[in-house]
Amino acid sequence: MGLQDSGHVSRTWFVAALLMLAALHQATAKDLRQVTEPKIPAACTSLKGSGGDETSVIQKALTACAKGKAVHLASGTFVSGPLTIPSGVSLWIDSGVTLKASSNPKLFDNGKNLCGTLSSSNSGCNPLIHINGATGSGVYGKGTIDGQGGVTMTGKSISWWELAHEAQEKNSNQNCPRLIEIDNSKDITLYQITLKNSPNFHVVASQTYGFTAWGVTINTPSTARNTDGIDPAGSQNVTIAHCSISTGDDNVAIKAGNAATKYVSITSNTFGVGHGMSIGSEVNSGVSDVTVSSLTLQGTTNGIRIKSDRSRGGLVTGITYSSVCMKNVANPIVLDTAYSKTATGSKIPDFKGITFSNIKVLSAGKFVFNGYSDAVPIEATLNGVHITKGSTWTTSHAKITGKYTEDASGSC
Ligand SMILES: *[C@@H]1O[C@H](CO)[C@@H](O)[C@H](O)[C@H]1NC(C)=O
């Protein structure tokens, strides 16, 4: 073998190694776990709902349940105040069964006497379901959890949602319970369950390593304020798959206020009404290695959105959107480093390594790329972005590689 040949061989290997590195890098832009369809755990006990308040019956069963098993709500309707799911234990709500959140704010009050009122803070209520410091817990089954957000609160003349609107009008904060809150946990699963009418966010998974939402349906009106669908926050190894989400705020919002969020796979989901597939606005601790693939959005206000401002800053990088189809979406792509126009501060939102491939937007809309400065521009790559004529495309402080085409056709 001559010198030239070996040079050729090593160049070939060099290129091959580069391609492998690129593939490896791509492969890390997602949940690092191998996630397969969850299985409902065996029942430790089965309960029949009477239609009345059964908080203590359900809580006792959860507390007594062996690790690895589930409390099975087998039939009927249950009404409940806050429940805590212990480590290793799950709640299984069977087909045709409804677990309703009580409308009594006193039951949810966390000691500040603020739940169900307006105040300067919004942390006065416990969630309906709390999973805290747990490993291997979950909520399973084809039944429904109804937050009753539109029902008049006990002892009040308005509903949780009306309280949320009053807060907006009065520039105050509503104290309304979340439906499911997961904190500092590991390997938590939501499977098949339908969530509706949450008084506030439906699901928040904070500082949780290993979180799977699979086949979950969220169905809440567009008018219900601050009712985010699923919010992973400061979490790692997250999969949201085969879910259908319609709600009054972000369908999904990835946040990183207190810790970084990374290794996230959002795949094969359908969004109806809502504020779209969001990252932000709390991204100060950084969001990276996120893949959003096979997503359909119909009738959301925003499609793909990354938002922050100078009060938060934050690095958002290694984000891939692929095979996304949108129809009747007013703002299909919005990358905005000045989300709150009134924010003050000097923190720098830095969005780079953002890739859009195979995106189809079947109705005209507004596309916005608003970077921080020429020194810190948004860096995005377009690879097969098909939009509809009549759209507006605005860029400021943005380095965009590739082009969009006004040739979207077909259906979602
Ligand atoms: C994420 O999952 C991978 C693969 O299972 C695991 O090695 C890693 O420790 C997980 N990360 C965290 C923060 O738990």
Image (cartoon, grey):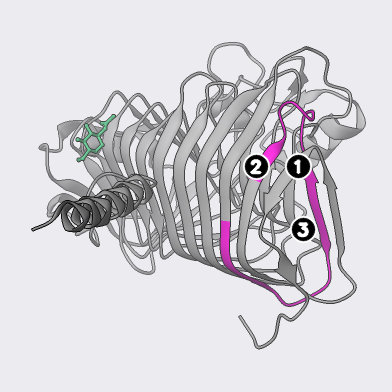
Contact? badges 1 and 3 (CB < 8 Å):
no
Residue 377 part of the magenta segment: yes
Q: Residue at x 15, y 33 (%)?
A: 64
Q: Residue at x 53, y 21 (%)?
A: 285
Horizontally, residue 81 falls left or right of residue 187, namely right
The circle drawn on residue 208 is: none
* Callout 2 amino acid: Glu
Q: Residue at x 17, y 51 (%)?
A: 3
Label 3 residue SS? loop
Q: Where does label 3 land, which residue?
A: 301
Q: Earlier in the sequence, mark 1 or mark 3?
A: 3
Nearer the camera: disc 3 or disc 2: 2
* Callout 1 amino acid: Ala
The circle drawn on residue 379 is: 2
* Callout 3 amino acid: Thr
- Crowd band around label 1 with a 10 angstrom C-alpha radius: few (<14), some (14–19), many (20+): many
Contact? badges 1 and 2 (CB < 8 Å):
yes
Is the residue indicated by label 3 positioned so its CB lies within 8 Å of ligand 1? no
Q: Earlier in the sequence, mark 3 or mark 2?
A: 3
Horizontally, residue 347 falls left or right of residue 320, namely right
